[in-house]
Image (tube, grey):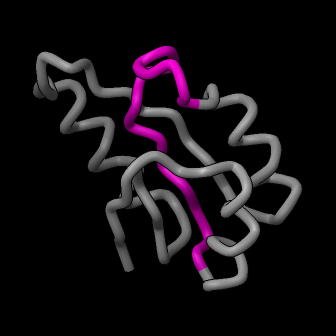
Amino acid sequence: MFTVATQVDLAKIGKIAETGYKAIVCNRPDGEGADQPGFEEMSKIARDLGLRTVYTPIALTGATEKDHAAFARVLEDMPKPILAY
């Protein structure tokens, strides 16, 4: 019901949908890497394919208690299966 992946390649979002995932959770802050697409760009493609998306960035310094609580709510509320990166 839950999978963790490395950076999502925009060209592979269609495959993610075809595989049966219902939601994508982005934990990477925008601008974290030069080759990383922004959340809005990823989210638009995913939504067009019927996937729900949510942006819950975690700073490189690590997750806070607030981050943990927000992520727990996301896991509870989003349709499964979920792919997070």
9, 60: nearer the viewer:
9
Q: Measured from the top left, where is residue 73 in percent x and y?
A: 35, 47
Q: Is residue 64 left or right of residue 53?
A: left
Q: Measured from the top left, where is residue 27 in percent x and y?
A: 38, 37
23, 73: nearer the viewer:
23
Quadrant (top left/top right/bottom left/bottom right) for the N terminus: bottom left
Q: Measured from the top left, where is residue 52 in percent x and y?
A: 67, 56
14, 34: nearer the viewer:
34
Q: Is residue 59 left or right of residue 52?
A: left
Question: Is 24 in the magenta?
Answer: yes
> In the image, what residue occupies the spot 46% across and 63% down?
83
Relative to residue 79, is residue 69 depicted above or below? Answer: above
Relative to residue 33, is residue 55 depicted above or below? Answer: below
Task: Give the residue furthest to the front.
Answer: 35
> In the image, what residue occupies the spot 37% across and 59% down?
5
Q: Measured from the top left, where is residue 50 in percent x and y?
A: 80, 65
> In the image, what residue occupies the spot 63% across and 71% down?
16
Count the marks: 0
Relative to residue 79, is residue 6 depicted above or below? Answer: above
Per the picture, the main secondary structure of the magenta-coloured stretch is loop
What segment carries the magenta color?
21-36
2, 73: nearer the viewer:
2
